[in-house]
Image: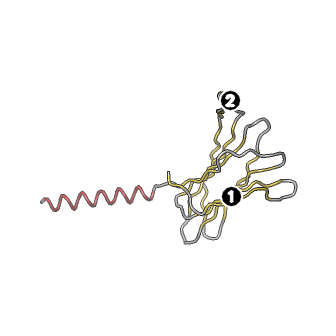
Amino acid sequence: MKLRMIVAIALVLSAAVAAGAQNRLYRFSTGQVTLGPGQVLRVTVNGLGGNDTIRTQFMRETYGMPTCSGGACRYFFNVEALPVMMLSTHESLSTDISQPTGSGGVGCVVAANTRNIRVIAMIVDTTTGETVSFCSSAEVDTW
């Protein structure tokens, strides 16, 4: 009887752990980025292989002007969550974020249902198309 109870508890726990792993979100954040005139923050996501369809969502952040006191500054920000998009094998998704006049910066968070993605963030000059700054992540954090 005790053995059946232990086996039943073990099965329930393993099912709960498996369900939790399937619902896990992985996130990449650019943090706050201050853009110059004629620049955009371009964030691109692509899969690293495999045949899985990846649920991906961009969350654009716009920071207000700071209030500073004692050497520390406080920023308020707004988040615009874009619709969830499905990323298939051999596809990539991207979004461009421009900094509104009078704002303190922009940022982007990418959420996905797998860490098997590459996120590339770059600052692009919209006049020339030149990449001014570049950051790539092969792994994303678990939150």
**Residue lying furthest front in this view?**
71
Which residue is found at the position 65% from the left and 43% from the top? 80
Of residues 139 and 113, the one drawn nearer to the viewer in this rendering? 139
**Residue lying furthest right in this view?**
127
Q: Earlier in the sequence, mark 2 or mark 1?
A: 2
Quarter of the rendering containing residue 86:
bottom right
Residue type (three-letter) at the residue carrying disc 2: Cys
Q: Is residue 69 above or below residue 128?
A: above
Disc 2 target residue: 68
Of residues 100 and 74, the one drawn nearer to the viewer in this rendering? 74
- What colouring does the structure picture have? secondary structure
Which residue is found at the position 20% from the left and 59% from the top? 6
Q: Which mark is residue 135?
A: 1
**Residue lying furthest left in this view?**
1
Answer left or right for 53 relative to 75: left
Q: Is residue 39 above or below residue 54?
A: above
Residue type (three-letter) at the residue carrying disc 1: Cys
